[in-house]
Amino acid sequence: MFSQVTSHEAAADHWPPPPSPDLSDEQKELRLEAEREAKRVSDAIDLAISQDREARRSRRSTVGAKVLLLGQAESGKSTILKNFQLHFSPKAFQEQSELWRPVVHLNLVRSVNFILNVLLPSKGASSPRPSSPRQLDDTLRRLCFSLTPLKQVEETLTKRIVGSTILPPIDTAVAYRSRASSVSSSLFINHNSSKECLTFTSLQYHPARASEISIRSGAQSSSWKRNLNLFNRTPSNKQNRLEAEEDAANRRIISACGRDIQALWQHPDVQARLKEEDIHLKDQPGFFLEDVLRIAQEDYIPSSHDVLRARVRTIGPEEHRIFMENLQKQEGGNGCYTTLEEPGVSEVRVFYISFRSGESSAFPTSAAWAQFFDDVTVVIFLAPISAFNQALAEDRTVNRLADSMKLWRMICSNKLLASVDLILLLNKIDILAANLKAGIAFSKYVTSYSKDKPNTVESISKYLLEMFNGLHHQNSPKKRKIHPHLTCAVDTKATSTVIHHIQELILLKTLSETNIL
Ligand SMILES: Nc1nc2c(ncn2[C@@H]2O[C@H](COP(=O)(O)OP(=O)(O)OP(=O)(O)O)[C@@H](O)[C@H]2O)c(=O)[nH]1
Ligand SMILES: [Mg+2]
């Protein structure tokens, strides 16, 4: 069946064929040189093709996206941003966990000092509601005494995180409002020097946000992180060494105070006093008192969940760059990562804008905001739907949910954003659920919601979604799609599905805008 292969045919199978035995040595050498040259040319062509392929691939994979992250104060923007970082840059997120330790510690220490201030209002510092000191039992007196060093810890941590030259934002000087009370009293004063700033941030507490710290950012993200980076660097010079020693001393003090902090928080008189004052520390941002024994350990490193809950209130617009690591967890979830080969969006620039009351009314025409609206891939808007029974800290006559809707209307009607897809996150559904479970009637605060309708998350979120959709429909200059989600931003697992959807949308929009699709 098969014919015999001749030696000539066999030779033809190899390239280049061996020189004919009839050739002279000189001819053989010329022939070999010609073949070497042909190979050089061929290799050069192969290299050029491969470089071209790589360049095309890298052009595709260096596409960037611009995301606007908008919402009123405390709507959960920073928490969603952290979820983005956790999802897209997990290695960088993990590497930065250590940076959040001083923030968690400061949140914790501020809660403790706030309680001490309630129990023993000092002359110089403001207490949430000035009242005469009460008789403390022996245990409380001992605890107050043993926890005194935490005042100093708060001061040094504040100085380090806020930075010595950065003033705290004055708009934290909001009127006091506890959750249920209708009483307000302005406790804050304008401070102009950085020295006073330290006193202000250290010793004065907002009763509704006792543990949080406010930082005015630069245009580039997180100047406070730069301060903390310095904090964590290797102690190479005298200043760094002093800072490292101060950090170690703070850790030791917090660690030594751990059990007493727990005892203070669990003391029945403390709980009774806070209740009497209508102060709900547990519901406040940056609340870590129930994790104190874990957090106070000297070698404590914040978990992802701690980082999500750590509260820094940043004032002013910020730009965050998230570099996509294109990583995913290996099956088995052993913490190892494998690189994905697929090209996609390599960088997401997130422009973060927090709107306080008053700013929203200037929103559509303000040149200050307009600079951020150019070339936007998607807008993510957060509405904290648990805030239906709260008033704005800035203006106690305005319901927070109503304010969120007003802001949403402004964004929908903005002409610069007319062609941009809107992602609507109805956030804090866990708090909404807890409030409803505690018997708070939604219809009492949102009167357009019939009393006969169920006071359940399902029914209320459906109603709110219709409201937000309706506002969009009435105000948007163009027809476009809204991508709504119900979220609990502190639940990374549940949020990862939402982030994944957002990622797909960003990819789709970016690639279609750059004509790759
Ligand atoms: N329980 C619960 N807490 C949340 C949720 N989203 C955010 N938080 C918490 O709410 C507080 C405020 O969230 P942030 O993300 O700091 O809010 P923000 O919109 O960045 O606020 P500003 O910086 O003031 O503009 C933080 O303590 C978060 O941990 C949520 O869905 N559920
Ligand atoms: Mg924030």
Image (cartoon, rainbow, N blue to C red):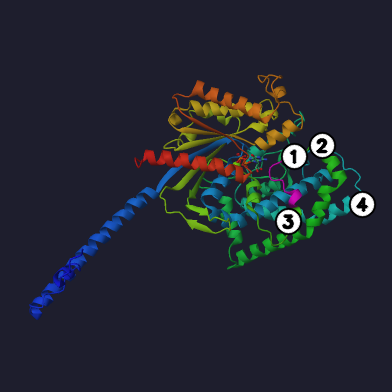
Is 281 included in the stretch rendered in magenta?
yes
| Location of mark 2 (residue) | 277
Q: Amino acid at mark 2?
A: Glu
The span picked out in magenta is: 280-291
Marks 1 and 4 sit apart, C-alpha to C-alpha, by 26 Å
Q: Residues within 10 Å of mark 3 (few under 14, many from 20)?
A: some
Query: What secondary structure is found at the residue carrying circle 2?
Result: loop
Q: Earlier in the sequence, mark 3 or mark 4?
A: 4
Marks 3 and 2 sit apart, C-alpha to C-alpha, by 28 Å
Q: Is residue 53 visible?
A: yes
| Location of mark 1 (residue) | 207
Where residue 138 is drawn, which disc sits there? 4
* Residue beneath the point at 47% across and 29% down: 481
- Ligand 1 under 8 Å from disc 4 Cβ: no
Q: Position of residue 46 (x, y in %)?
A: 25, 60
Marks 3 and 4 sit apart, C-alpha to C-alpha, by 27 Å
Contact? badges 1 and 2 (CB < 8 Å): yes
Query: What secondary structure is found at the residue carrying circle 3?
Result: helix
Q: Amino acid at mark 1?
A: Pro
Q: Amino acid at mark 4?
A: Asp
| Location of mark 3 (residue) | 294
Q: Position of residue 38 (x, y in %)?
A: 17, 66
Contact? badges 2 and 4 (CB < 8 Å): no
Q: Position of residue 247 (x, y in %)?
A: 67, 61
Question: In what quadrant of the picture does the C terminus appear?
Answer: top left
